[in-house]
Amino acid sequence: MLYLHPAGDAACSPLIGEHHGTWSVGAPVEDTISALHLITHGIPSRYPRMKILNSHLGGALPMLIQRMDNQLPWEAPETPEPPSVAARRMWYDTVGHGHPPALRCAAESFGTDFPYQTGAVFERAVSYITSSGLAPREADRILTANAEALFGLTRVS
């Protein structure tokens, strides 16, 4: 398993770091960039048995995936498969800071897993999944079935 997490360096941009956006804006930009690099280099398709877990709902990837499908054929023609196909080969955590629209966008784009917080923040990271407006089946995938598939577990009845 390869777990990707932002370094917290404001995506190497003074436009972010010098304006107090290192974690609020820079982290999701770093998440998006790392996923883009994997996709354009064909890592998800070249290593289909490697489970790649992206942080923070994949950053802006859920909002940009269609744009990437449209643009990369001419911008990065060596990309081996459509970004939307490659993105579905990877895994995503549910760290959306309790924002249901972000969770729904990611779930509709490619699914989600694993909140990292503790205490009340962790409880919100879980409860917002069931109260976000996702179908119960989708919430079950996020809370149970996806983790079982990721780790090769079987559900005990």
Image: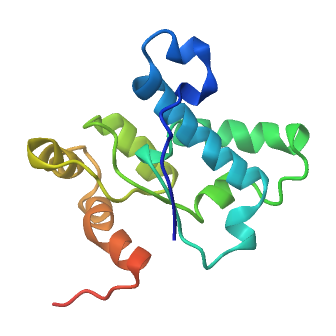
Q: What x and y, as percent, mark residue 100?
A: 29, 38
- Give the side of residue 56 with respect to residue 65, left or right: left
Instruction: Report the label total.
Output: 0
Residue 154 vs 76, above or below: the answer is below
| Nearer to us in this view, 130 or 153 | 153
Residue 27 vs 117, above or below: the answer is above
| Nearer to us in this view, 109 or 12 | 12
Q: What x and y, as percent, mark residue 57?
A: 44, 46
Q: Quadrant of residue 12?
A: top right
Residue 71 vs 83, above or below: the answer is above
- Give the side of residue 144 with respect to residue 67, left or right: left
Residue placed at 80% from the left, 36% from the top?
71
Q: Quadrant of residue 81?
A: bottom right
Scheme of image coloration: rainbow
Most extreme residue toward the top, as rendered? Answer: 19
Residue placed at 17% from the left, 48% from the top?
122
Quadrant location of the C terminus in the rendered image: bottom left
Residue placed at 41% from the left, 28% from the top?
23
Residue 83 vs 75, above or below: the answer is below
Q: What x and y, as percent, mark residue 34?
A: 62, 46
Residue placed at 77% from the left, 61% from the top?
42
- Give the side of residue 131 with respect to residue 25, left or right: left
Q: Quadrant of residue 149?
A: bottom left
Q: What x and y, as percent, mark residue 119?
A: 9, 47
